[in-house]
Image (tube, grey):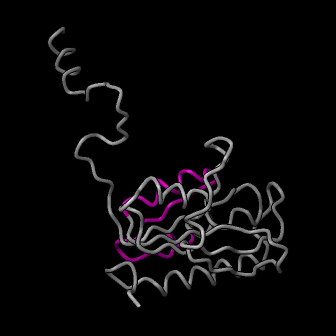
Amino acid sequence: MTGDREAGAASRPPVGPRVQVDPPGFEPPGCEVAVIGCGNLLRGDDGVGPILVRRLAETGVPAGVRLVDGGTAGMDTAFAMRGARRVVVVDASRTGAEPGTVFEVPGAQLENLPLDAPHPHAFRWDQALAFGRWLLGDGYPDDVVVYLIEAGGVEPGADLSPAVRRAMEQVRDMIISGLAPGTGGTDG
């Protein structure tokens, strides 16, 4: 019994002052495109990102596309980008525009935001892009685009409003049209 315990202990990585998230030699699964849907499924139109990711999973995407339900944890968005060449983020917005309005924002406009969240759980996805730029360094995706869909209502327990559902399908079509079979994207 002691030999088994010692063998198990010997196979564990040593504990030291350096923190290592992944085991030595571990590389995250790479992909051409990661589609990350952010938002709260329990709050009406705010759930448009995760619902869109589920819709893409139902209809299918080409090989090389990773679908991620980013939920409400903005910092997780930075980690979800790891190993992707291209990233598409989808979330609801509240700008005062007509519900269902779609905004396309190049990630480069957001990746240099200040990292001033009071604690890690307060990170939004846009701050996560800046964090991801710092965290991933040369491994940061070559291309990041954000689709924001203007929300109408974010009441707890509500479904997507008709305008946001139509906009979600429009964004889904835009994402699918940008994916070439077998490559996960187009190069212009």
Q: In the figure, 155 relative to 121: above or below?
A: below
Query: Relative to 7, is 73 above or below?
Result: below
Q: Which of 33 and 21 is in front in this view?
A: 21
16 within the magenta span: no
Residue at the image point whose x is 67% and y is 59% from the top:
39
Q: Identify the residue at image location x=61%, y=43%.
A: 120
Residue 99 sits above or below residue 116 on the image = below
The part of the image, by quadrant, that contains residue 156 is bottom right
Rendered-image quadrant of the N terminus: top left
Q: Which residue is drawn at 28% across and 52% down?
A: 27
Direction left: furthest residue: 3
Foreground residue, 58 or 5?
5
Q: What percent of the width, then of the height, locates residue 182?
A: 31, 80
Using the image, determine if residue 123 lies above or below residue 97. Answer: above
Q: Describe residue 130's horizontal placement relative to residue 45 as left or right.
A: left
Give the magenta part as a residue range. Answer: 55-83
| Percent of width and height locating residue 169 | 63, 81
- The C terminus sits in image quarter: bottom left
